[in-house]
Amino acid sequence: MKTILLVTIPRILLGLLFLVSAIDGFWWLATGTNFIHPPTSERGLAFEAALQNSGFIWPMIKVVNLIGGLSLLFNVVPAFGLALIAPIMTVIAFFHLVLNPQGLPVAAILVVLGLLLVWAYRDRYAALFR
């Protein structure tokens, strides 16, 4: 039961969030519109537009979201998937902290889920700190 609450549920939720984010990002690339776009501040929209208009960062982020999300969702090398999306989760958290405070609840959920999984997979990351 402990494994389900502390590993499986966070892994699936985080995988779904990043999979949906990837699909939404690819949809934007194809159509110029979003499926899902929560309320965003003017500065937040400017930052998002800069990423989208760069020509390479937005697609790269969405590919990483897709790979990391699928890895977590299907439990195939999930520690690697989490390592892939960790920098993106950090940017999301600071984005909401600095540019778009109305999104802080979602950012907090991402941080909590991510930290639960980092703790669960800590043995897989141990070699990085030796």
Image (spheres, helix red, strand yellow):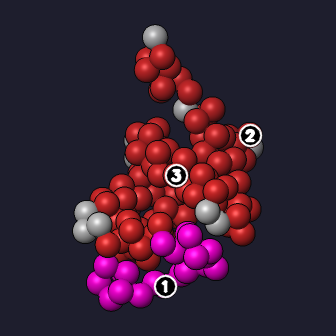
Labels 2 and 1: the sequence-earlier one? 2
Rendered location of residue 16, percent (x, y)? 53, 64
Instruction: Find residue 2 and name its label.
Output: 2
> Disc 3 marks which residue?
91
Q: Residue at x 44, y 17 (%)?
A: 127
> Disc 1 marks which residue?
35
Going by the numbered disc 1, the residue's amino acid type is: Phe
Q: Secondary structure at mark 1?
A: loop
Vertically, is 69 above or below 38? above
Q: Are marks 2 and 3 in contact (CB under 8 Å)?
A: no
Going by the numbered disc 3, the residue's amino acid type is: Val
Q: Of residues 2 and 127, which is closer to you in this image?
A: 127
Q: Residue at x 70, y 64 (%)?
A: 101
**Badge 1: residue crowd in 10 Å (few <14, some 14–19, many ≥20):** few
Residue 58 sits in quarter: bottom left
Q: Which range of residues does the magenta coloring cover?
A: 27-46
Q: CA distance from mark 1 to mark 3?
A: 21 Å
Q: Secondary structure at mark 2?
A: helix
Vertically, is 37 above or below 5? below
Labels 1 and 3: the sequence-earlier one? 1
Asked if residue 95 lies in the magenta stretch, the reply is no
Q: CA distance from mark 2 to mark 3?
A: 30 Å
Q: Residue at x 74, y 43 (%)?
A: 1
Rendered location of residue 128, percent (x, y)? 43, 20
Q: Is residue 3 left or right of residue 32?
A: right
Asked if residue 37 lies in the magenta stretch, the reply is yes
Q: Nearer the viewer, mark 2 or mark 1?
A: 1
Q: Of residues 118 and 77, which is closer to you in this image?
A: 118
Rendered location of residue 108, percent (x, y)? 70, 54
Labels 2 and 3: the sequence-earlier one? 2
